[in-house]
Image: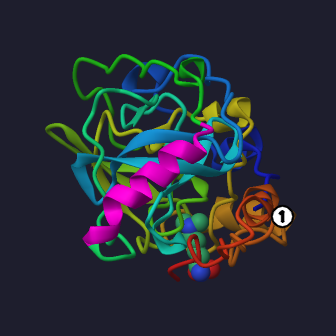
Amino acid sequence: IQSDFDWDEYLRLLGPEAGDPAPAACFKQAAEPPSNHFQLGHRLESRDPRNPDNTCIASVIDRLGPRLRLRLDGSDDRNDFFRLVDSEDLFPHPSGRFIVPPLGFAKSSNYWPGFLEKVKAAGNFAPADCFVRPPASPAKNLFAVGQKLEAIDRKNPLFVCPATVKEVRQDRIFVSFDGWRGAFDYWCRYDCRDIFPVGWCQRAGYPVQPPGNRAPQQPQPLQRYRGKHASGGSSPSPNSGTFSDKSAAASPQLPASSAAAPAA
Ligand code: MLY
């Protein structure tokens, strides 16, 4: 994944008509990005992203900055997901929660008790001090239309990209990815953990992708930016770079490449 995006230069090129960065107080993110003390192969308890009332055992497949790539034990590499180390979805083991098989447990449920025993015996559970307390949430939606932010591309969740608040409605905002003509845009709550203040990810050691080149909204400045960064943006490969290279090494028995394959 690329890491040569420069917010200062981008905002300068967009000029005064571009919105200001959304203030940090808008976001449910730590003032200083938390450090990541998890190691590859560490186990932990996690909500099942596809069934969030359920708690499962997960393994750390990869890590980059404060983000973890996780795989539920008993699931396959097609359902990997990403969480911040201060996520409210992660718990040290044992948490006292009842552990259930992940949605789509690979084998018949008869195998579950034995499977769980084996996983627990294998151990390697992450120590409790790896888990960072989730940040406080803003009391209400403070976002304004036009503000800039960094957002996770939910179709390609390896990527964090420059984006703009296009609409604000009650507790939700509409996140629009700069230069991608709406294909990756989504509504989310203001306290969603997939959005960050401008500059947060770089401080966290997580790369931000350059904007796409398909923007009808502000063609002039975007073209100028793209002209100076010829390689960027159109088809970043999620399979190159630190994150997925490491993940392949972490799980030789399961190919990690398919999980974050781009949707477009
Ligand atoms: N295969 C897609 C990947 C696009 C990723 C867009 N994100 C970063 C907003 C493409 O190249 O169109």
Is 85 in front, or is 159?
A: 85
Q: Residue at x 43, y 50 (%)?
A: 117
Is 245 in front, or is 114?
A: 114
User: On screen, 40 above or below 133?
Assistant: below
x then y, percent, for residue 222 = 66, 63
x then y, percent, for residue 35 = 67, 24
| Residue at the bottom extreme of this rendering | 264
Q: Residue at x 66, y 43 (%)?
A: 11
User: On screen, 155 above or below 123?
Assistant: below
Quarter occupied by the N terminus = bottom right
x then y, percent, for residue 5 = 76, 51
Whether residue 126 is visible: yes
**Relative to residue 234, is residue 110 drawn left or right?**
left
Residues rendered magenta in the picture: 109-124
Badge 1: how crowded within 10 Å, few (<14), some, or many (20+)?
Answer: few
The number of discs equals 1
**Relative to residue 173, is residue 76 drawn left or right?**
right
Tag 1 residue: 229
| Residue at the left extreme of this rendering | 170
**Could you tell me the amino acid type at mark 1?**
His
x then y, percent, for residue 122 = 59, 46
Whether residue 147 is visible: no
Q: Which secondary structure is most common in the magenta stretch?
A: helix
On whether residue 114 falls in the magenta region, the answer is yes
User: On screen, 185 above or below 133?
Assistant: below
Q: Please tell me in which quarter of the rendered image ligand 1 is found.
A: bottom right
Q: Residue at x 25, y 29 (%)?
A: 141
